[in-house]
Image (tube, rainbow, N blue to C red):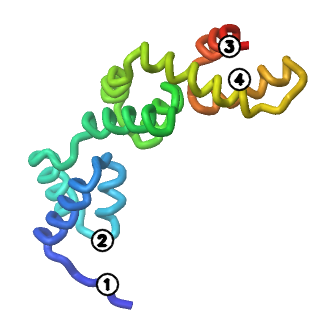
């Protein structure tokens, strides 16, 4: 099976559309670039073009990722940090992204999801109920001390 051959300009356009559709990190763009089997010089040229024309911006990606995962999936800071590190985002950009989450909103969200989850836990034993709630919130990426504080308040 033969693969279609693209010029560097065609690949640039394809990757511009790829980046415009949704913010992307370098890792995602490089994975997409590997599909085209380019020589290293052409890869670097395309990546440089995307960065210079602001199609590829790691800080913007990290900020939108953190906002989205917190507001939509209700993830905690620890889970967001873990996922950004997995995508090879720098510590500076991770810290910048976490500033997008307001402390008051963070605590309010934690309390809301704890209350909702608590209602769905069918457990008579109070200790097991607390343990299940704690594990759920910990998997969501919330900090242990905040979880314990919220559990004390709502139970």
Q: Are marks 1 and 2 in contact (CB under 8 Å)?
A: yes
Whole-angstrom CA distance, mark 1 to mark 4, is: 51 Å
Q: Looking at the picture, how far across and down is residue 24, in whole percent?
A: 30, 49
x and y percent of residue 52 in the render?
A: 10, 46
Residue matched to label 4: 134
Please state the horizontal and vertical placement of residue 94, each as a whole percent of the image: 37, 28
For marks 1 and 2, give the CA distance: 10 Å
Q: Sequence order check: which comes first, mark 2 or mark 4?
A: 2
Residue ID for mark 2: 37
Q: Residue furthest right?
A: 125
Q: Label 3: how many residues lie within 10 Å, few (<14), some (14-19) or many (20+)?
A: few
Position of residue 94 relative to residue 21, above or below, is above
Q: Secondary structure at mark 3?
A: helix
Question: Residue visible at 52% across and 27% down?
Answer: 76
* Mark positioned earlier in the residue sequence (1 or 2): 1
Q: Which residue corresponds to mark 1? A: 3
Q: Quick one: SS at disc 2?
A: loop
- Side (left or right) of 51 relative to 95: left
Answer left or right for 13 relative to 31.
Answer: left
From the viewer's perspective, is the residue at label 1 or at label 4 nearer? 4
Q: Nearer the viewer, residue 147 or 47?
A: 147
Q: CA distance from mark 1 to mark 3?
A: 59 Å
Judging depth in this view, the residue of 38 and 1 nearest the camera is 1
N-term-proximal mark, 1 vs 4? 1
Query: How far across and down, in percent of the image, does residue 53 sit?
Result: 10, 48
Q: Nearer the viewer, residue 57 or 40?
A: 57
Res. 154 mark: 3
């Amino acid at each position: 099976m033969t693969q279609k051959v693209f010029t560097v300009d065609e690949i640039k356009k394809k990757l511009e559309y790829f980046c415009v559709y949704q913010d992307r990190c370098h890792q995602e763009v490089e994975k997409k670039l590997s599909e085209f089997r380019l020589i290293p010089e052409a890869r670097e040229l395309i990546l440089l073009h995307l960065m210079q024309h602001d199609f590829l911006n790691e800080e913007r990606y990290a900020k939108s990722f953190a906002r989205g995962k917190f507001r939509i999936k209700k993830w905690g800071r620890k889970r967001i940090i873990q996922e950004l590190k997995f995508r090879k985002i720098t510590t500076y950009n991770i810290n910048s992204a976490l500033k997008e989450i307001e402390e008051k909103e963070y605590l309010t969200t934690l309390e809301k999801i704890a209350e909702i989850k608590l209602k769905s836990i069918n457990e008579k034993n109070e200790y097991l109920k607390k343990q299940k709630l704690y594990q759920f919130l910990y998997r969501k990426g919330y900090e242990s001390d905040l979880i314990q504080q919220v559990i004390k308040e709502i139970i």
